[in-house]
Amino acid sequence: MTMDEIQEVSGNERVFPACYNRLPRKADWEISNFKMYADELRLRNFTPGVFNRSHWEKLMTLTCMEHLGFLNNKNTVINIGGGIDAINYYLSKYLKKIVSADLYDDSWPTCPSSVLENPDLYAPFEYNRNSLKFERIDSKNKLPFNDDTFSAAIAIGPSLNFIGYYEDIVYAIKEFSRTVENHGILFMDLDLSLTSVRAVKSDSEYFFSPDSLQKLFIETPFKPICKIDLSNPDFQQEETRADRWLPPKRAWNSIGVIPSRIMRNFPFIRIVRPTIFPVLVVSKNEKLI
């Protein structure tokens, strides 16, 4: 897709911000697509202007996919760490095929093994049963797909940060690249410490520094389709505190906003400040913008 085609698809800048690769902003809730997608996904407790990480990353990913022309029945997409999220069921109505890849070993409530046999158990609305498939896959290993199988890949949640160390993440992204066709797109978000000189590894999660993020795109075939804008984060204090705190042996990074009354009940320790997550839209082997 050329720059002219992207501009033609994206149309009014008010509908979609010019920069895809950036931090969350309060103005995002003014994007017309956000409310529409929130309604169609049936997101619980969605309140325009109130930040929720889980909501934001889904709504921004769908907005990116629409404006890059990926929501059509010609495309096949793999959702890494997709769990039983509503976005899988939603995309089945628009894509030729959507594969949700996760452990599905009952280790988390979002990874029930029963979804492999009966996806209807977790469907939040009607969906295309012929287009959606759940597969038990550990993204730390080689993906069981041929080269150039998919038009695009999704890795939000942040599923990539929980894979392991930096080398493990690089390997996983190279596997995504192998299975995504040339010039395909990877929609992902990564946890990032803006104030850390070097990356940080907790018991279960890897936090990128700006330098390690830049290094990631040198060592993998995916390249950002536009400049990564890490300036002026609107959500770096109370709104993202659940993304900046860790209990001693467990990361709570993907929970979203944790109420103060719950925060007081856990012996949290602060390890980096602040940790923020950009949405990153990257293209295989070609810089589109």
Image (cartoon, helix red, strand yellow):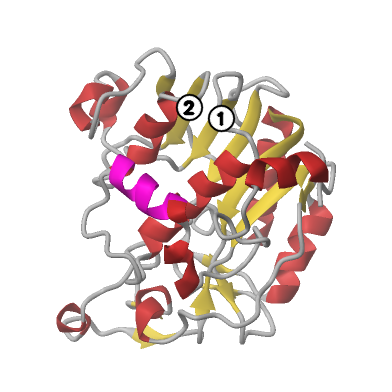
- The picture places residue 112, in percent across and down from the top left corner, at 26, 36
x 44%, y 64%: residue: 30
Which residue is nearer to you in this view: 140 or 159?
159
* Residue 34 is one of the magenta-drawn residues: yes
Mark 1 neighbour class, 10 Å CA radius: few under 14, some 14 to 19, many 20 or more: many
Residue 41 seen from this side = yes
Mark 2 and mark 1 in contact? Answer it, CB < 8 Å.
yes
Amino acid type shown at disc 2: Val
Q: Which residues are magenta?
A: 33-40
- Give me the disc on residue 77: 1
- The picture places residue 263, in percent across and down from the top left corner, at 22, 81
SS label for mark 1: strand
x 78%, y 64%: residue: 215
- The picture places residue 39, in percent across and down from the top left corner, at 29, 46
Residue 56 lies in quadrant: bottom left
Mark count: 2
- Image quadrant where one finds the N terminus: top right
User: Along the horizontal axis of the image, is 231 left or right of 126?
Assistant: right
Q: Earlier in the sequence, mark 2 or mark 1?
A: 1
User: Along the horizontal axis of the image, is 212 left or right of 49?
Assistant: right
